[in-house]
Image (cartoon, rainbow, N blue to C red):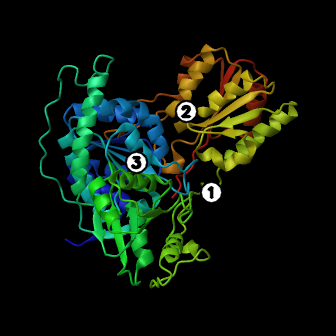
């Protein structure tokens, strides 16, 4: 069959289908959303289930149940979503899994669509579970199939780490192959197998370490690691950074350059790395974002008594922040190989050719106008409220805000300001998706502590910055049809909110302003829901 042009996200989805995935869960956030979307679009054709969850913790909880029930499951989230899912992950590592369970985690070097650029590779040693990183769409497709088999063989969660660059890169690949019927495993009900408690925590941890030792040995022969070239100067790169390295070296004489392509991020293949270091007098490590590999490689070399000079982020040869671009790689390589003459010289001045797509916002986004109106009505009342916000579309109106931290933080931050003795009114701003994600928990806390707080929910009918995924306020699709509605205002009333106002789509601005004036003068716990539909970002 003819090859098709697809991106990295779709290649991973095809690999999951070919691995016999039964269910995919997740919470929207790029990178990673594209793979879920591709699996959602093909669910009816290939018979798997695709379900957006209210947050990443729930997505992983559902996945754990699917795995215990004997079916293969994929969880899609970005690195900051792993923060949310970590509570479950740090128990699931102890219990292990039954059927294959793979987490697709999207890191965002350069923070092109995130509020931070944390390096998610550190989750693997923290949870003591294996992590791999594909370099190309074709490898990602194969790696996804391999990860499900490996997860099932070792009864462990497997994490695949990708970055934005991998998500958007493209390749011509054969069409997805319908998998052979995969026999589901019988549900596992082994006594105490899935119960983590004081009684079995230490034995479970001991079992985890034994399993990790076997995994470490197996990772010495991971088919995705590779050494190329010869010479005393070495360079090590993993994942899509290795693909960018190939571009940076194209056409150059690299006969004296030994290259190690790493796919197994954790555990690192100690034997392979030691053998590589033995052949080198100097090694350049290229990676995004933190010196994770650099430090690990130095530790392996020290333990083995093999200590060539290792340079990278710690030495200042590679930037310590942001996405690593090809021109930066060429600069680092030229410092080691002055005569390097690649076919194409990448420069900082021309970096726009590599510049990734940074998320924009919908034309005519109403958030600026809404918050400007709120500020104006407050000023007319002689008030200057502190506005705290959750991430999302509201970032377009950042100039009106005092604080924006992470999902679900707006209510808590507003409560903290009041506890600090701030006399001005505290107003928390959240989107509809963030409200369900974690703001509702903080709202319950606000009610139970008798807080004087106003919460404004900007309801634009879904997670618009990540593709318009629906929320329960209008019904989440189940089996192709909208599910039951769990309305924002009904939840707020159940939480004990004292006063609730709603600004509908068709209401004039004057009515919204009247509601703002009334809400700002009403003591107690209040909620204003403002409904403004808009189209998803392309």
Check disc 2 and report the residue beneath it. Answer: 435
21 displayed left or right of 119: left
100 displayed left or right of 266: left
Q: Nearer the viewer, mark 3 or mark 2?
A: 3
Q: Nearer the viewer, mark 1 or mark 2?
A: 2
Q: Residues within 10 Å of mark 2 (few under 14, many from 20)?
A: many
Q: Is residue 320 above or below residue 331?
A: above
x, y percentage for residue 20? 20, 48
x, y percentage for residue 186? 13, 32
Point 42% across, 78% down: residue: 249
Residue 105 shows which numbered tag?
3
From the viewer's side, name the closer residue of 358 and 253. 253
Q: Secondary structure at mark 1?
A: loop
Point 63% across, 29% down: residue: 411
Residue 165 can be seen in this image: yes
How many angstroms separate mark 3 from mark 1 (CA)?
A: 30 Å
Residue 296 shows which numbered tag?
none
């Amino acid at each position: 069959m003819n090859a098709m042009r697809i991106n990295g996200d779709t290649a991973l989805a095809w690999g999951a289908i070919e691995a016999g995935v039964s269910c995919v869960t997740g919470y929207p956030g790029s990178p990673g959303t594209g793979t879920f979307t591709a699996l959602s679009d093909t669910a009816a054709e290939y018979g798997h289930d695709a379900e957006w969850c209210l947050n990443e913790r729930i997505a992983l909880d559902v996945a754990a149940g699917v795995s215990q029930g004997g079916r293969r499951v994929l969880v899609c989230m970005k690195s900051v979503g792993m923060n949310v899912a970590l509570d479950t992950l740090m128990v699931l590592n102890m219990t292990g899994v039954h059927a294959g369970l793979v987490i697709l985690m999207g890191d965002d070097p350069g923070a092109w669509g995130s509020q931070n650029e944390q390096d998610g590779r550190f989750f693997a040693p923290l949870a003591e579970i294996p992590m791999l990183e594909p370099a190309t769409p074709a490898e990602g497709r194969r790696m996804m199939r391999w990860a499900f088999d490996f997860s099932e063989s070792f009864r462990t969660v497997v994490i695949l780490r990708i970055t934005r660059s991998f998500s958007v890169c493209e390749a011509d690949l054969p069409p997805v192959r319908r998998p052979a019927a995969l026999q589901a495993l019988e549900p596992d009900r082994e006594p105490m197998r899935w119960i983590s408690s004081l009684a079995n925590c230490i034995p479970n941890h001991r079992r985890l370490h034994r399993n990790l030792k076997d995994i470490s040995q197996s990772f010495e022969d991971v088919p995705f690691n590779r050494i190329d070239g010869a010479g005393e100067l070495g360079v090590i790169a993993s994942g899509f950074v290795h693909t960018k390295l190939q571009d940076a070296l194209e056409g150059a004489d690299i006969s004296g350059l030994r290259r190690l392509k790493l796919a197994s991020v954790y555990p690192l293949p100690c034997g392979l790395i030691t053998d590589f270091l033995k052949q080198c007098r100097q090694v350049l490590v290229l990676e995004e974002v933190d010196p994770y590999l650099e430090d690990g490689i130095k530790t392996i070399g020290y333990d083995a008594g093999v200590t060539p000079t290792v340079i990278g982020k710690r030495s200042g040869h590679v930037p310590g922040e942001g996405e690593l671009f090809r021109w930066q790689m060429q600069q680092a390589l030229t410092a080691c190989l002055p005569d390097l003459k690649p076919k194409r010289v990448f420069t900082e001045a021309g970096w726009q050719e590599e510049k990734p797509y940074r998320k924009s916002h919908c034309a005519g986004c109403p958030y600026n106008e809404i918050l400007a109106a709120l500020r104006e009505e407050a000023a007319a009342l002689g008030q200057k409220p502190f506005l705290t916000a959750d991430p999302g579309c509201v970032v377009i109106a950042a100039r009106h805000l005092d604080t924006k931290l992470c999902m679900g933080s707006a209510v808590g931050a507003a409560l903290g300001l009041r506890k600090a003795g701030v006399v001005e009114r505290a107003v928390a701003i959240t989107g509809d998706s963030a409200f369900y994600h974690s703001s509702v928990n903080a709202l319950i806390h606000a009610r139970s502590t008798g807080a004087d707080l106003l919460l404004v929910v900007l309801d634009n009918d879904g997670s618009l910055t990540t593709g318009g995924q629906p929320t329960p306020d209008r019904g989440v699709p189940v089996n192709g049809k909208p599910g039951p509605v769990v309305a924002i205002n009904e939840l707020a009333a159940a939480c004990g909110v004292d006063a609730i106002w709603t600004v509908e789509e068709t209401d004039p601005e004057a009515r919204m302003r009247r509601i703002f004036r009334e809400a700002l003068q009403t003591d107690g716990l209040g909620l204003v829901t403002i409904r403004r539909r808009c189209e998803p970002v392309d």
